[in-house]
Amino acid sequence: MKSRTLIACIAAALPSFSALAADIAEPPGISAQIRPEGEKPAFVLKAAGVQIYNCKASPDGYEHKWSFVAPDATLSENGYVVGRHGAGPTWEFTADGSAVKGSAKARQDGGAGNIAWLWLPATSVGKAGRFANVSSVLRVATQGGVEPTVGCDAGHAGQDVKVPYTADYYFYTKG
C-alpha cells in the first residue's frame, strides 16, 4: 500500500515538473542572431571551470599565437554538480550518461574581458536521458575565459594556459 501511495505522489508531481520546464525564460540580453528559431529553453545549468589555450607557432615559426584548445568545466544546478562540459564541445549529465555535442553557429559579444556568448545547435551523443532531446545550447552571462594577450613566444611554444571562466548554459528543445 505504501508503494502505491509513493507512486501516486510521484505521478502527481510529474506534470508540475514539466510545467516548470515550460516556464524557463529566455536569457536576458540575447540578440536575434543567437536565438534558436522554433525552440524553447528547457533548463539552465551554471558552468565554472577554465578555457584552455595553447601557444602555437606560425608555419614559418616566426610568430606565436594563443590557440583555443577546449573548455573544462563542471555543470551545476541549484548548487549541486550535475555534469561536465569539455572538448567537442560536449555537455554530459552524469546521473544518466546523456550527452550532447554542439557546433557554434552564431556569437554575440560577451563584453570586455569575457568570452563571447554562443548559439550552438546540438545533437545527442550519449545515452537516453536529460540531454537526449536538447536541440541547441546557448552560452550566456560569461565571465572571463578570454585568451591571454601576452606570454606566447618561442620560449612558451607548446605550453597550455588555463583561463578561469563562468557561464550560464541554456539547453533548448524543439518547441
Image (spheres, rainbow, N blue to C red):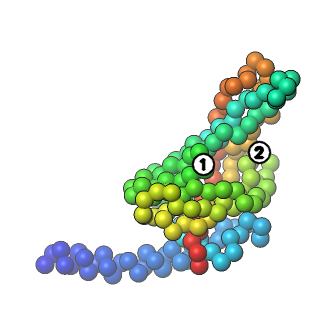
Q: Residue furthest front?
A: 59
Which of the numbered marks, if any, corresponds to residue 88? 1
* Image coords of residue 29 (percent x, y): 74, 66
Q: Residue furthest top?
A: 155
* Image coords of residue 155 (percent x, y): 75, 18
Between 159 and 19, the residue placed more toward the observer is 159
Q: Is residue 108 left or right of residue 120?
A: right
* Image coords of residue 136 (percent x, y): 62, 65
Q: Is residue 174 above or below residue 122?
A: below
Give the residue number, with chain letter if any, for mark 2: 113
| Amino acid at the residue labelled 2 | Gly
The residue located at (64%, 63%) in the rendering is 121
* Image coords of residue 158 (percent x, y): 69, 25
The residue located at (69%, 43%) in the rendering is 145
Q: Is residue 38 above or below residue 108?
A: below
| Amino acid at the residue labelled 1 | Gly
